[in-house]
Image (cartoon, helix red, strand yellow):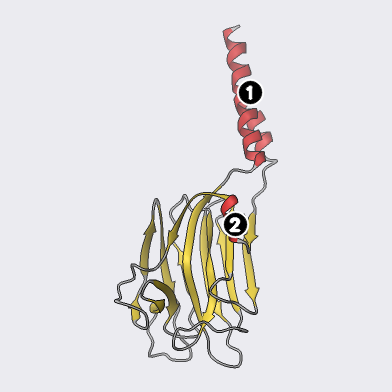
């Protein structure tokens, strides 16, 4: 009886993948956030190539960054990254403009990913009026593709899922000039339970308590 009641209540909870463009709102929707700053890249400063894939950790979270191959320049190997920004604030970008950065292999507790996603030029400088696409996929098969036509190093984007996240892929659209997908300060977190989740938990406890009282009687 208790199991049947819990199953019925759980049916009211739907899978969801929410999008945030405001960092403050994103942080209110998550708990225990940790930030990958890329300052620990195996380079001495910006403007240097970085070989991947990159296994990264932040607090209790972990993920792997990989870069796709280049169709424009086949001499650039897969998982070839580049460091941009400054010595005190490194950014992660690709070595080929048509490569995409994919963050995947998240630890099971990662249900939220956010960060600054923007376009940079061949020297690693941010460029305006160029489009960036970010695709998030979660374990329930939900996906969200977000496209921004004008990004800056302060352009924030975050995804919060009711289940584990599978991947977040960043790519730069090639328009008039070549641009490179660039990421800074990637935030990993777990989602704050929705009110429905609390209601389900309380209802479940009430059912279990009722059954226990019946048995004692």
* Count of numbered circles on the image: 2
Q: Quadrant of the N terminus?
A: top right
- Asked if residue 154 lies left or right of residue 200, the reply is left
Instruction: Give the quarter of the image for residue 172.
Output: bottom right
Q: Which label sits on residue 59?
A: none
Q: Is residue 55 above or below residue 152?
A: above
Above or below, 61 relative to 210? below
How far apart marks 2 and 1 lie (CA) works out to 35 Å
Residue 200 placement (x, y as % from top left) = 64, 34
* Residue at image coords 43%, 74%: 92
Measured as percent of width and height from the top left, residue 115 is found at: 52, 65
Q: Dot 2 corresponds to which residue? A: 24
Find residue 146 and report its image quarter: bottom right
The residue lying toward the viewer, choosing from 102 and 3, is 102
* Residue occupying the point 44% across, 82% down: 69
| x, y percent for residue 29 | 60, 50
The quadrant of the image that shows the C terminus is top right
Within 10 Å of the Cα at label 2, are there few (<14), some (14-19), or many (20+) other Cα atoms?
A: few
Q: For the view shown, which residue lies furthest in the front direction?
A: 88
Q: Is residue 193 above or below residue 128?
A: above
Element at label 1: helix
Decide which of 138, 30 is in the foreground and name it.
30
SS category of the residue bearing label 2: helix
The residue that label 1 is drawn on is 206
Find residue 9 and report its horizontal and vertical position in percent. Answer: 68, 35
Left-right relation of 176 to 36: right
- Toward which corner of the image does residue 196 lie, by quadrant? top right
User: For this view, does 52 lie left or right of residue 17?
Assistant: left
Callout 2–callout 1 Cβ contact below 8 Å: no
Q: Can you tell which of label 2 and label 1 is closer to the viewer?
A: 2
The answer to whether one can see residue 4 in this image is no
Report if residue 213 is visible in the image.
Answer: yes
């Amino acid at each position: 009886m208790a199991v049947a009641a819990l199953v019925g209540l759980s049916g009211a909870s739907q899978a969801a993948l929410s999008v945030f463009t405001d960092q403050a709102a994103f942080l209110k929707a998550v708990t225990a956030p940790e930030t990958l700053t890329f300052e620990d890249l195996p380079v001495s400063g910006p403007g240097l190539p970085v070989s991947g894939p990159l296994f990264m950790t932040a607090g209790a979270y972990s993920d792997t960054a990989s870069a796709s191959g280049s169709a424009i320049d086949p001499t650039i190997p897969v998982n070839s990254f580049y460091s941009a920004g400054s010595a005190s604030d490194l950014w992660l970008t690709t070595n080929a403009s048509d490569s995409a950065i994919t963050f995947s292999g998240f630890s099971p507790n990662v249900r939220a990913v956010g960060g600054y996603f923007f376009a940079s030029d061949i020297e690693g400088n941010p460029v305006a009026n160029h489009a960036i696409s970010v695709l998030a996929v979660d374990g329930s098969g939900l996906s969200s593709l977000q496209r921004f036509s004008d990004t800056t190093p302060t352009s924030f984007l975050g995804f919060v899922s009711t289940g584990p996240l599978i991947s977040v892929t960043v790519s730069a659209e090639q328009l008039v000039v070549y641009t490179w997908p660039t990421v800074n300060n990637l935030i990993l977190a777990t989602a704050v339970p929705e009110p429905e989740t609390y209601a389900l938990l309380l209802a479940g406890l009430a059912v279990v308590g009722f059954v226990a009282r019946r048995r004692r009687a």
